[in-house]
Amino acid sequence: MATLKLSNITKRFGRSIVAVNNIDLEVRDGEFLVLLGPSGCGKTTTLRMIAGLEEVTQGTITIDGVDVTDLPPRKRDVSMVFQNYAVWPHMTVYENISYALKLKKMGRETIDATVKEVTRMTKISTLLDRYPSQLSGGQQQRVAVARAIAVKPKLFLMDEPLSNLDAKLRVATRTELKAIHAMTKATTVFVTHDQSEAMSMADRIVIMKDGEIVQTGTPEEVYDESVNLFVANFIGTPPTNFMDVELTIEDGSLHLINSHLNLQLTAEDAARLKDYDKKTLVIGIRPENMLLASAEDAALTVQCLVAEPQGSHQVVAVEMDDRLMKIIVPAQPKISAGETIHLAFKPGSMRFFDPETDLRI
Ligand SMILES: Nc1ncnc2c1ncn2[C@@H]1O[C@H](COP(=O)(O)OP(=O)(O)OP(=O)(O)O)[C@@H](O)[C@H]1O
Ligand SMILES: [Mg+2]
């Protein structure tokens, strides 16, 4: 178990590519931290610098308070699982897992016991004599995980380890990895570009964009209190709905107005927005916070473009001023295309963003 700290870490490739730009990051003892962001934002580079596979251009990395910035990978006590598993094809499952333990000069009995323990956790105990070519993708992936946890590293690093699995197996393996983490309590940094994977697995999520950290927080924090339009749009399926509105003072109170909407603000929201009189804002509202209402109580009346039944609920798509919005409503009554629907906003659920800075107000 360990803590990890990155201070002012920058990675440049050549002169012009800044893959990671001056990031600070702390991972707590036993934490499952997820690095999340779109392709090319610097996740793999960050992980490789932590593992020692990539030199840092600037900054320091400490593990348990010890500066490891210039240490080679094998002296850092970290284990990494890659996207392509990288299990050795010429070795059986048992040999794959025990190889590093032999190098550590562990005794035969201890090795046997460790292999037994980690293969029980990863549910591959019956496959010990098989070669990787005789395993499914999901099974190979478990071998890679078992091999990584067998060495009981201080830090466990995983780079998109589920991305080669089909959708259903991926979701099941997520749950298993989380259960394994609950057993091992190994400090883990897990990389993914899949927000739902991040949300379902992380203790805390670090959201990256263009080599920088945009927001760090629990899944609930990044979902409910997204710091900018990028995060509000990136997190959640369907993502946050956005509406452009103008703020005006009418009859002494603050209103948000566009061609579909005239909302009087609560005192709390009005206080937050007092500097934005006559300015354009973006409202962000989560799909489940737009509620079906009667015509009298509606803040917004729109037409259903399509309704997608999901069994437990339906996702209704509507269009407003060229922006597509999706709304999550109960499965019944069934809504059909073309139907007029009246919507109210759940109190306290609107978030406001400044279109000039993209930041939450
Ligand atoms: N060896 C390299 N030489 C030059 N540029 C590189 C190198 N490795 C990465 N980069 C660049 O650094 C940036 C970050 O790459 P990185 O692989 O860390 O992204 P990522 O977030 O892991 O993306 P993905 O989700 O696609 O795996 C990208 O612009 C990439 O092209
Ligand atoms: Mg990557």
Image: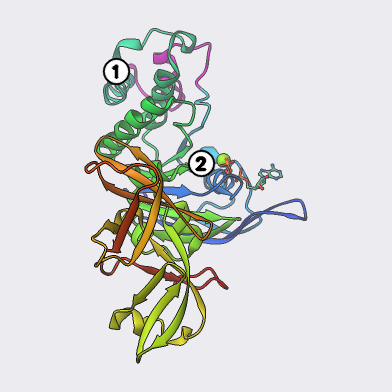
Classify 239 as above or below 106.
below
Classify 83 as above or below 115.
below
Classify 120 as above or below 1.
above
Q: Is residue 6 visible?
A: no
Magenta-colored stretch includes residue 118: no
* Of the pair 140 and 308, the residue shown nearer to us: 308
According to the image, label 1 marks what residue? 109
Tell me which amino acid carries mark 2.
Lys
Q: Residue placed at 27% from the left, 24% from the top?
A: 117
Classify 54 as above or below 243.
above
Q: Is residue 54 visible?
A: yes
* Disc 1 to disc 2, C-alpha distance: 25 Å
Q: Going from the N terminus, do you reach mark 1 or mark 2 first?
A: 2
Q: Secondary structure at mark 2?
A: helix
Q: Secondary structure at mark 1?
A: helix
- Classify residue 313 by image quadrant: top left
Q: Left of 61 or right of it: where is 261?
A: left
Q: Residue placed at 41% from the left, 56% from the top?
A: 240
Tell me which amino acid carries mark 1.
Glu
Measured as percent of width and height from the top left, residue 182 is found at 25, 40
- Figure quarter occupied by ligand 2: top right
Q: Residues within 10 Å of mark 2 (few under 14, many from 20)?
A: few
* Of the pair 267 and 129, the residue shown nearer to us: 267
Does the beta carbon of the residue at mark 1 sit less than 8 Å from ligand 2?
no
Measured as percent of width and height from the top left, residue 308 is found at 36, 38
According to the image, label 2 marks what residue? 75
